[in-house]
Image: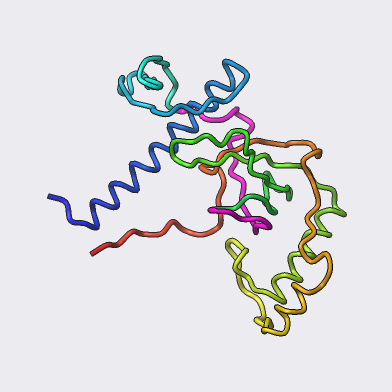
Amino acid sequence: MHTKKNFYRLLSAKHEIDRYLESMVWYWTKKHTGEGIMYKTIDVVGYPKDGILTLRLDGDKEIDVPLNYMHESDDTEHAIMLWHSDYYDGPISGLAEYKGKKVWFLWHSTAHEPLTELRIFNLHEMSDEAIEYEEERHQRFRDMIGHHCDYGDKEGPVNYTQESFDEYYDAPGHAVERDYTKNKIVATLDETFIDRGYPKKVVDND
């Protein structure tokens, strides 16, 4: 019999596997049909043999997918979220680093029909001027509001007060966010390939 803690860890592990399968199928269908498809159910019906996994989609259609199939070969590097600008039940947009360059990540909402709430992001190219603009804008937020939108490095002087809160939100245009959707998309990655810069929480329900 599993303890409550082990049960929740197993449940968490299953959730991660579901997310992986969902991502795998989305990229498989995108490659073979031109459009990534989210299915309501994904069942493993043929266990790995010669590196091949057989999946049943929505109870009828079966596909064979290589275990190592996920992204195109040049998209295997993880992106790292530096901070988010917009957030709703998870990050929506913000600054990330991908293959040594800073990019703007944006939730690709048209692909959001998930069975496990897997988010897929477009990574948009940015000019040096745009990067400087966003970093200065975000630094003002850090100084006056806090570091809670940062991933990884959240260190820095804590100078924010109620007065700085009021000053920030009373200033016209404080939340102006530029539109980068027309910028070149350098990659499309799901969140299993995006590191937020902090370790996953350990579930402890004892």
Q: Position of residue 94 (x, y in %)?
A: 68, 53
For this orientation, the residue located farthest to the right is 129
Q: Is residue 79 magenta?
A: yes
Residue sitting nearer the eye, 16 or 171: 171
Q: Compared to 136, does 59 lie above or below?
A: above
Residue sitting at x 62%, y 34%: 110
Horizontally, residue 201 falls left or right of residue 191, namely left
Q: Position of residue 204 (x, y in %)?
A: 30, 62
- Examine the rendering and report whether any part of residue 55 can be seen: no
Magenta residues (range): 68-89
Residue sitting at x 59%, y 33%: 111
- Examine the rendering and report whether any part of residue 176 can be seen: yes
Q: Compared to 75, does 98 lie above or below?
A: below
Residue sitting at x 34%, y 45%: 13
Specify the quadrant that holds the C terminus.
bottom left
Residue sitting nearer the eye, 142 or 200: 142
Residue sitting at x 46%, y 58%: 199
